[in-house]
Amino acid sequence: MRLFYLILFFALRYSLRIFYPRIKTVNSPKNPFGRTIYVSNHAASFMDPLVVATLRLPIVFFLTRSDVFNKVTQPILWAAHMLPIYRQHDGVDTKDENKKTFDKCTNVLKYGRNLLIFGEGFTDDTFIRRLKPIKKGAVRIGFYALEKFNWKKKVYIAAVGCNYSDPNQMRSDVLVSTSDKICLNDYREAYETNPIKTINDLTKMIEDLMKEQITHIEKKELSSFHENIMRLTRKGMNAINSNLSIPLINRWHYSKKLALWLNELNNQQLELLEPLQKEIEGYFSLQKRMRINENHVYELSTKRKLNRIKELSLLIILFPFALLGLIHCGPPYFLVKGFVEKSFKRRVFWGSVKLLLGMISIGLINIPFIFLFHAFVYPSYWLGFIYYLLIGLFGLAAYMWFRNYIRYKEKGILSKMDLTKILQKRTDLLEKIHDQIPVA
C-alpha cells in the first residue's frame, strides 16, 4: 500500500462520516488482500471510488479513464493506486496501451492485491437508481492474468453495489453491498473451449449479481414514480423524506423490493397506475410552487401541529461551535463551492469533488491553528492537534445550524397557513398507494 493511499484511506473515512452520517456495508470482505476483481456500478462518478475503497477493508487499485492522466496528475494518481484505461476516442492505440494496463493489473493480482473496476463505464448526468449494461473488461483482465499465471494462482471476481439516498446531498445515506466471490479458475475448461462465450456469460453473471446489490429500475421513466412513492411512505432511501428511525438496511430492502415490483409489471398494469403516478407528481409540484417542505406536511399530519422547540434548542446549543466552524471552514468552503460549480458543468461531479477539495483545503489552511492554539490557548501541541481534528466537526455544526435556522423559519411561515387541503391530499394518496401497490 502506497503512503498517499493510506493517508487518503483514513482522511476520507473521517470526511465521509461527516458527509454520510448513516453508512452501512453488507457482506463486506474482511481481508485487505484476496486477488479479487471488484466490479462496481457507477452511480455517482468520483464519489464511487471514494466510497468503495474507503468504507471497505480490501486494498484496491482503480482503473481510471486515461484522459485524467497528465504530467501534473500522474504522480498523484499513481500514489492513489490509479491505473489508466484507454477508450477509442482517446486518440491513442488503445490495444497496445490497454495491454500495458492489463500487464500492470496482472502484477497487482500477482501479489494478492485487488482491482476495482466500474463496469458501466460512465455515470448518468442525473442520479437514477438503475444499472446500465456492464462491459466485458473486468472478466477479460481476470482471464488475461490467469493465463500469465499459467492458472497456478486463483483469481476471483465479485460485484459491488453503491446505494445512495442522494450522492450529492450532505447528511444523506450510503450503503455498499458486496456479492459472494466467483473463482475464475473454475471456468478454465469453458474458457479454453470458447473464450468469447465464457467472457460473455460471466459478464452477464456479474451484471445479474450487481442488480442484486442495488436498487435497479428497468424503465428509466419509472424512476421518479419510484422515488415519489418512497417520499410519501418514508420507508425507502430518499435523501430528504425518510423515516430515519427505520434502519438503513431495511430502507434499502424496501427500495429494492419496490423497484422489483415495478419491473415485473406489464404495459397494461402500468397504464392502470398512470393516474396515481400523475396525482403524486401533481402533489409534489404543488408543494414546490407553494414552497412547502414534505417533512413539515408529514409532521402536521401526524402531530397536528408544527413544533419549533427542537430547532430553537439546536440553534442555541450549536451556535458557539457553528461560529468556530464558520471561521475555520467558511472561506475554503465558499471558494471550493464556487470553483467546482463553475468548472464542472455536470452536477454529478459536484458532491465528490467538493468533498475531496474541501477536505484538502480545510485540512491545509487550518494547520497553523495547531501552533496558534499552543501559543495563545494552552502550551500543548497534543491539545492543539486534537483541536485541529475537531475542525471538521465545527464545520458540520455550522452546516447543521443553518439547516435548523431554515427549518425554524419555514415552520413559522407554515404555521400561519391553512394546509387542510394538502394534508387531505396526502392522506388520500397514501390510501391509494397502499391499495394499488402491495409492497408499499
Image (cartoon, helix red, strand yellow):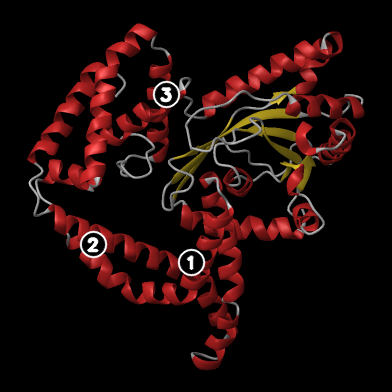
**Residue at the image point whose x is 73% and y is 59% from the top:** 4
Residue 283 lies in what quarter of the image?
top left
Q: From the viewer's side, name the closer residue of 111 and 5.
A: 5
**Residue at the image point whose x is 24% and y is 47% from the top:** 293
x then y, percent, for residue 372: 55, 87
Q: Which of marks 3 and 1 is nearer the N terminus?
A: 3
x then y, percent, for residue 40: 62, 34
Q: From the viewer's side, name the closer residue of 340 and 423.
A: 340
Left or right: 253, with 95 as reference point: left
Mark 2 is surrounded, within 10 Å at the Cα level, by few (under 14), some (14 to 19) or many (20 or more) other residues, namely some
Residue under label 2, please give it: 311
**Badge 1 element:** helix
- Label 2 amino acid? Glu
Q: From the viewer's side, name the closer residue of 231 and 187.
A: 231
- Label 3 amino acid? Glu
**Residue at the image point whose x is 51% and y is 92% from the top:** 376
Left or right: 242, with 290 as reference point: right
Residue 151 lies in what quarter of the image?
top right
- Label 1 amino acid? Phe
Residue under label 1, please give it: 334
**Badge 3 element:** helix
How far is mark 1 from mark 2, CA to CA?
25 Å
How far is mark 3 from mark 1, CA to CA?
35 Å
Residue under label 3, please give it: 221
**Residue at the image point whose x is 38% and y is 68% from the top:** 398
x then y, percent, for residue 121: 66, 33
Left or right: 348, with 71 as reference point: left
Q: From the viewer's side, name the closer residue of 436 and 149.
A: 436
CB contact under 8 Å: marks 1 and 2: no
